[in-house]
């Protein structure tokens, strides 16, 4: 109820007396109305919290307790102590969907489809369940052969020898879709010494932890124009293509290769081309100008091995290598300069530039909106910035603008962003797209120019600070240089390619080169959910502030400096890092807080009388302020060595901890999750919860093993 509505309920005599005295009663009712609105909103929220579909995340465990849903003990303790501090833990460890389906799961206990649903509902991982008894070798009894040819073929195929001429079957050996017969293993799937798989009562649950991320109608990178050789990835690196999972047709369906994010093999592309190729499917190729581009017909696409580019397709054909993410156009297919592709690649989570949904910005849009892309007024970012600069002339100080890129294009500009005192500029990608800013080369072509963010202020006291926000972009070919008076720089869901440019096999062109170079500017830098290379900061003073959260800082070499000064000394910056991974050495003047971080290189902090480190991993011999529960100091175990599945940018398992990494590290976060940039995935909690649910819903006498495919 608004203040005016409350005021209208008062008798007329009181309203008249209040008007005569200057309206103190109306002012009081304004405060009362605000409190009443807060109470009403709380009452409505309490009603929503009665239902599992609409309740808040922290309420889900308590609703689960009403239906007998058992919460892991240490998770229940964390929630009871402080639900706010738990962060995203309730949604990951106590999924809403799993609580809602608890009663239904009990009715379906023992079915294969239920075990797959558990993996999806409890952990959010696609899964396939395999009954190993169907894969055991056996001797076919002669008396069971019948005149029914189909029945005879089915029985002879069960437990038969491997056909070495069946290439597709050989590709699936050892995986979740393996159909080859095996001898019985005595060890159980959950054995702590040696896990066995193939038993009469053994069931395997294969889960996929990597996710398939789409790139839609983006330019392919031309590697050789004369031979029409292309890379799917616009960064010109080999990228394995993955299947875009499709929903299973029914609850009783057991997942197949189209329902999981499986890497596409050459044989699979050849045999299941109709399922994988085409608009809206796992991959697609267009040729011709973008406005009138034609989809390459299904009949003209062939799978090929393009490892050495020796394969030449027939005229009119397009050869695709899904293992390497390469393609070659046959003679007469289309203009070699106009090729666009859609494909899916794999990664662990929403990090860096991508087409995944990004959260809304902290502040709503203000100022003019300049849209860049096909069909819009501005065809380039530089053109939009020029119009903004022209609109500022003669106007008041402190202009605001949003430049939004609406398509997956490659923009080889701008070279400089000029910010006057009080300006606020947001350069972002629209939702669902991932544009690329490829920084142009210098005059001699030997060194990238870089993107310069130049503040023109004088630095006098009282001067309005400038703000620049980069959101959802992929920047390649160079780094970002901050010069002049820039008050605040924000990087949200961006990728500044480590090493500037990637060469063959993903090797960086300039190892250790800074993706972010700050000099002569006391700037506050905020990095959120981003991937960037080394950061170089002027060593003078401590006015610079760097706040890194849920991000990766990759110097491309553990011996290189990931954060430091250009001369190799300490950067003049006060560092705060939470839930981040740093590949390389850190040399800073001071730190405020390092929490839940993986610091793979030596850490040197000049001022060790302030700040602290909590729940981090850092090499022995590092010089830091006070540490609390950091490895390997806390456990004192030499086995607590840091191991990653991959440390090269572009790999599907980039910066993910290896499964062979010590438990002290994999569960070394403040809430039992892994430290580093993938902390928010809560994978240890998901795994624990899934193992408990599998044991709960597996029939007595059946042994269930959990296997991670990726």
Image (cartoon, helix red, strand yellow):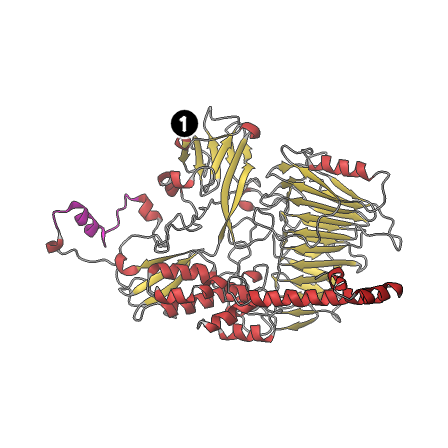
- The one nearer the camera, 630 or 493, is 493
Residue 674 in sight in this render: no
Q: How many marks?
A: 1
User: What residue is drawn where x is 84% and y is 52%?
Assistant: 464
User: What residue is drawn where x is 55% and y is 69%?
Assistant: 59
- The one nearer the camera, 202 or 188, is 202
Residue 211: image location, x then y, percent: 49, 52
Asked if residue 40 is among those painted magenta in the image, a careful observer would answer no
Give the side of residue 103 with respect to residue 664, left or right: left
Residue 457: image location, x then y, percent: 85, 48
SS category of the residue bearing label 1: loop
Give the side of residue 651 with respect to residue 150, left or right: right
Residue 247: image location, x then y, percent: 42, 50
Q: Which quadrant, please, contains the C terminus? A: bottom left
Farthest top residue in view: 332
Asked if residue 148 is among those painted magenta in the image, a careful observer would answer yes
Give the side of residue 170 with respect to residue 661, left or right: left
Q: Answer few, some or many: residues within 10 Å of disc 1's Cα (few below 14, many 20 plus, some between 14 and 19).
A: some
User: What residue is drawn where x is 51% and y is 61%?
Assistant: 53
Residue 348: image location, x then y, percent: 52, 55
Q: Which quadrant, please, contains the N terminus? A: bottom right
Residue 526 in sight in this render: yes
Q: Is residue 702 above or below residue 384?
A: below
User: What residue is drawn where x is 68% and y is 35%?
Assistant: 380
The residue at which mark 1 appears reads as 314
Which corner quadrant of the image does residue 570 belong to?
bottom right
- The one nearer the camera, 265 or 155, is 155
Range covered by the magenta-colored residues: 146-166
Farthest left residue in view: 143
């Amino acid at each position: 109820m608004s203040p005016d509505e409350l005021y209208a309920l008062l008798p007329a005599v009181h309203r008249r007396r209040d008007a005569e005295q200057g309206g103190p009663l109306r002012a009081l009712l304004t405060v009362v109305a605000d409190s009443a609105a807060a109470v009403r909103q709380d009452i409505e929220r309490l009603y929503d919290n009665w239902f599992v579909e609409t309740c808040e995340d922290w309420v889900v465990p308590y609703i689960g307790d009403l239906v007998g849903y058992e919460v892991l003990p240490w998770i229940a303790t964390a929630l009871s102590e402080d639900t706010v501090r738990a962060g995203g833990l309730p949604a990951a460890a106590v999924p809403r969907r799993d609580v809602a389906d608890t009663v239904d799961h009990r009715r379906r206990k023992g079915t294969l489809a239920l075990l797959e649903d558990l993996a999806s509902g409890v952990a959010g991982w696609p899964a396939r369940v395999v009954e190993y008894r169907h894969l055991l070798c056996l001797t076919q009894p002669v008396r069971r052969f019948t005149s029914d040819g189909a029945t005879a073929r089915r029985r002879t195929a069960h437990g038969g020898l491997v056909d070495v001429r069946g290439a597709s079957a050989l590709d699936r050996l050892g995986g979740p879709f393996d159909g080859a017969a095996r001898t019985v293993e005595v060890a159980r799937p959950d054995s702590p010494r040696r896990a066995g798989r193939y038993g009469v009562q053994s069931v395997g649950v294969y889960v996929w932890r990597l996710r398939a991320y789409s790139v839609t109608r983006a330019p392919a990178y031309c590697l050789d124009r004369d031979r029409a050789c292309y890379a799917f990835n616009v960064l010109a690196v080999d990228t394995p293509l993955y299947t875009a999972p499709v929903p299973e047709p029914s609850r009783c369906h057991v997942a197949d290769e189209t329902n999981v994010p499986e890497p596409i093999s050459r044989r699979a592309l050849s045999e299941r081309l109709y399922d994988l190729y085409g608009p809206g499917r796992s991959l697609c190729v267009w040729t011709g100008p973008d406005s009138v581009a034609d989809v390459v017909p299904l009949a003209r696409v062939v799978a090929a091995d393009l490892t050495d580019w020796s394969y030449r397709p027939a005229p009119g054909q397009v050869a695709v290598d899904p293992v390497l993410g390469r393609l070659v156009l046959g003679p007469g297919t289309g203009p070699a300069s106009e090729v666009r592709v859609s494909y899916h690649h794999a990664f662990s989570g929403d990090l860096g530039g991508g087409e995944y949904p990004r959260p809304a910005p902290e502040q709503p849009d203000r100022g003019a909106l300049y849209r860049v892309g096909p069909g819009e007024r501005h065809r380039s970012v530089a053109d939009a910035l020029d119009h903004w600069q022209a609109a500022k002339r003669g106007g008041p100080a402190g202009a605001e603008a949003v430049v939004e890129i609406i398509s997956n294009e490659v923009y080889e500009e701008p070279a400089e962003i000029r910010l006057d005192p009080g300006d606020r500029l947001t350069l972002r990608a629209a939702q669902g797209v991932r544009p690329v800013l490829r920084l142009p080369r210098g005059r001699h072509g030997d060194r990238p120019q870089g993107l310069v963010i130049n503040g023109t202020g004088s630095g006098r006291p009282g001067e309005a600070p400038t703000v620049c926000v980069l959101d959802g972009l992929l920047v390649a070919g160079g780094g970002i240089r901050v010069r002049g008076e820039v008050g605040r720089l924000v990087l949200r869901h961006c990728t500044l390619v480590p090493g500037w440019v990637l060469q063959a096999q993903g090797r960086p062109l300039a190892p250790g080169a800074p993706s972010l170079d700050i000099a002569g500017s006391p700037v506050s830098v905020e990095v959120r959910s981003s991937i960037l290379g080394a950061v170089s900061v002027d060593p003078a003073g401590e006015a610079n502030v760097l706040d890194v959260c849920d991000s990766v800082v990759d110097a491309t070499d553990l011996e290189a400096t990931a954060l430091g000064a250009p001369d190799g000394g300490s950067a003049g910056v006060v560092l705060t890092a939470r839930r981040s991974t740093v590949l390389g050495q850190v040399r800073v003047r001071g730190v405020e807080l390092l929490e839940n971080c993986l610091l793979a290189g030596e850490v040197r902090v000049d001022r060790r009388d302030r700040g602290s480190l909590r729940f981090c991993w850092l090499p022995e011999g590092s010089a830091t302020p006070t540490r609390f529960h950091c490895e390997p100091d806390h456990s004192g175990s030499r086995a607590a060595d840091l191991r990653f599945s991959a440390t090269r940018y572009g790999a599907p398992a980039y910066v993910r901890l290896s499964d062979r990494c010590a438990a002290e590290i994999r569960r070394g976060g403040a809430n039992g999750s892994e430290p580093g940039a993938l902390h928010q995935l809560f994978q240890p909690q998901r795994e624990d919860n899934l193992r408990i649910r599998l044991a709960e819903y597996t029939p007595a006498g059946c042994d269930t093993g959990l296997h991670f495919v990726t």
